[in-house]
Amino acid sequence: MNSFSVMLNLKQIVAQLSENDFEEFSLQLQKSKADKFHTLFSLLRKNGADEDAVMQHLEINSSAFYTLKSRLHDKLQNYFAKHVPETEIDLLKNVANIPTILFNTPRATAIAKLKKMESELVQSDMPYALTSVFNALKKIHRFSPKYFDYAQQYNKHLAYTMALDKVEELLADFCKTLGEYLLSRDKKLLELLPVIKREMNNHAQLYESHHLKVYKNILDVSFALFVPLPDEIVNDEPIDDILIQTEKIIQQYPNDTLYASLKNIVTFLWFEYYHTLKIYKKAVLYYEILNVNLSSFLLYNFCTVPSLFLISKIDTALVSDSEETLWEDFKKLSSNFTSDTADIPNHINYAKFHAVAAFYSGRNDEAIAVLNELINDISFLSFPHAEIEVKLFLALCYICANKYDLSFYLVKNVQRKLRDMKNPEYENAIVFSKLLTLQMDFSHKHRVEKMFELRNKFISLNHGEMHMLEFIRLSDDFMKQLSKTGN
């Protein structure tokens, strides 16, 4: 890991520590009289000071500074390793100790220990670890009539954990495909989603398992909310019934550490359900719960498309006429979360949220910088829908910043792409590009009147699968202001 990466990771880790963890780790450094570590740790927490300022404060050179950063990074990793819940650590230590029990413990004692372990693992709902226990019991009873029973238990749990792995993988595949579809509107990806849904249903029926049921429910609700294929859900239960059923399952297993996180996905799905129905009073209850844990929730990209909440967050602000609050929301989020550029769908949505927040706070130059960085860093080859939307938004931001030459060439670029695509469903994008072109044509005799006509036409067309730019409030006041820009 190079110096920059270490510093970047340190800034993120220190910023994301809870107050309790920060105070406890800080106290550890003070007790061990690690003054320079404590100073660096405090400076990173306070304001994420840049490297030159920190080195000057510590009165050390770059080589010593790199060593200090690396060692502080190691100390934090050791701290995290020691702060896993004690119960879970003890159980996993016991499981790891099974070979020692097998080879060095008298049989009666070994069986007693393994049976105790089995009971605790069942109570804590740790099926993966149970396979190790039953495998050991099977070996011990190799010459006993009980061998067959333990062999069956082992095979059952091994098959179950494989099924659980499979449904987790199917949900991850579904979420990745859904994210890619929403940014590409590729029909082939759309056709793949019901195939994954059917495969999930088949695997979930292999065992009477609440885990399999929960994963299936999450996929089914996500499909109903985000996939525009209504014929594929005609035989499914209503969304609210599925979510209520899922909540009841999770409540029955309070010691399940997996469910402690999956309940956040259920909260997200409840929010999206009510938000889609425009029942905002109920939606806001789930919105507030999820918003508190947003930086953590955005890490759930293997079992949902978490950045969709950011898009709905923009819509919620527009509905409540509070879009000016988006900037503070983004600043708070960015202090605890760093988007993964390798996860292109979620990263694009995160960057879009950043740019929209900047746009509504009057920070047009920052919105421009964010969108340009996105275009330069990400390949949009597989995401033409997102490319069109991002570039049209960037062109609008250029106009608002009086950078007409840049906007003009960008609009022309989008119009060429739309012509090459020859997709009649993108008439909304064509109309919006004409609106931007007209805005820059100050010689047009009926320019303002025609701009309003194009605005109205765009709104009337901007429905269905190819909808875009809903985050731009094209109100009369905004259109009047836009028409005056550059005059």
Image (cartoon, helix red, strand yellow):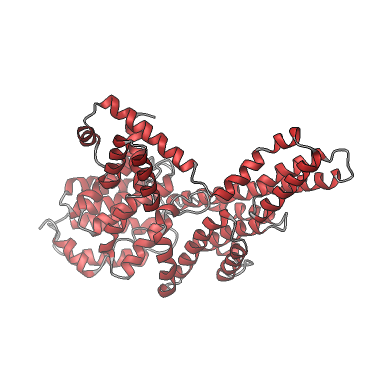
Callout count: 0
**Quadrant (top left/top right/bottom left/bottom right) for the C terminus:** bottom left
Report the residue at 30% width, 36% height from top: 35
Report the residue at 46% width, 66% height from top: 271
Image position, residue 435 (x, y; %): 25, 58
Q: Nearer the viewer, residue 415 or 175?
A: 175
Q: Nearer the viewer, residue 353 or 214?
A: 214
Is residue 278 positioned above or below 341 on the image? Answer: below
Image position, residue 312 (x, y; %): 39, 62
Q: Is residue 465 visible?
A: yes
Image position, residue 179 (x, y; %): 47, 51
**Residue projecting furthest to the left:** 487
Q: Nearer the viewer, residue 178 or 56?
A: 56
Is residue 140 positioned above or below 346 on the image? Answer: above
Q: Nearer the viewer, residue 396 or 333?
A: 333
Left/right placement of residue 252 relative to residue 453 reads right
Left/right placement of residue 445 relative to residue 231 reads left
Report the residue at 28% width, 64% height from top: 323
